[in-house]
Image (spheres, rainbow, N blue to C red):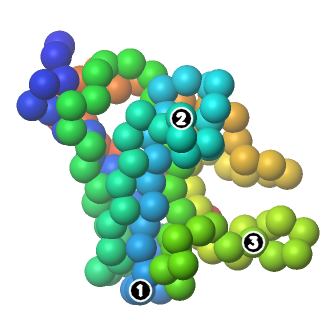
């Protein structure tokens, strides 16, 4: 099935503060996962409610992993405390969990077969 004309809709849920922006990046390989320059698609969306839907068009069928965070103060970066722990909410596809570091590409990986599809990410 071709992805032309299709879209992947990503619903970001559990937004606690209705302000700021949602930053989202889509990756298609483990090498360079979470390095923004290696993302195959990125989007920034304003937070207008407790849920935001971001749509990606023209992705080819294949394996992907998504990383997102809520930039509450709109400073364009993921804020962290002195020991490097994020102070802003974040999430990954498949709701992959961060334990002592970010999850691997494989933990967040899902297969997009093309056409119209939806997925949900719960911020943590």
Q: What kind of element bears circle 1? A: loop
Which residue appears at 29% of the width and 22% of the height? 60
Q: Which label lies toward us, 1 or 2?
A: 2
Q: Which mark is residue 83?
A: none
Mark 1 or mark 2: whose residue is earlier in sequence: 1
Total numbered labels? 3
> Which mark is drawn over residue 80?
3
Q: Nearer the viewer, mark 3 or mark 2?
A: 2
What secondary structure is found at the residue carrying circle 3? Answer: loop
State the image coordinates of residue 79 (x, y, percent, origin top left).
68, 73
Choose between 84 and 10: the one closer to the eye. Answer: 84
| Quadrant (top left, top right, bottom left, bottom right) of the N terminus | top left
Judge whether 63 appears above or below 103 on screen. Answer: above
Q: Using residue 11 as the reference point, say whether residue 70 is left or right of it.
A: right
Q: Which residue is mark 1?
A: 19
Q: CA distance from mark 3 to mark 2?
A: 22 Å
Q: Residue at the spot x=90%, y=69% of the render?
A: 83
Q: Give the mark nearest the N terminus, 1 or 3.
A: 1
Give the numbered dot on residue 38.
2
Q: Position of residue 124 (x, y in %)?
A: 61, 65
Q: Residues within 10 Å of mark 3 (few under 14, many from 20)?
A: few
Location of residue 31 with respect to 104 vertically, above or below: above
Q: Pick out the residue farthest to the top.
A: 1
Which structural element holds mark 2?
Answer: helix
């Amino acid at each position: 099935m071709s992805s032309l004309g299709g879209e992947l809709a990503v619903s970001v849920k559990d937004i606690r503060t209705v302000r700021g922006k949602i930053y989202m990046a889509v990756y298609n390989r483990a090498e360079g996962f979470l390095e923004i320059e290696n993302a195959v698609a990125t989007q920034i969306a304003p937070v207008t409610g407790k849920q935001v839907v971001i749509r990606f068009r023209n992705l080819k069928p294949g394996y992907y992993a998504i990383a997102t965070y809520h930039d509450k103060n709109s400073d364009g970066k993921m804020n962290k405390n002195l020991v490097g722990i994020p102070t802003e909410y974040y999430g990954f596809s498949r709701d992959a969990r961060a334990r002592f570091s970010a999850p691997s590409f494989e933990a967040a990986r899902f297969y997009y077969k093309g056409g119209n599809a939806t997925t949900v990410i719960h911020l943590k």
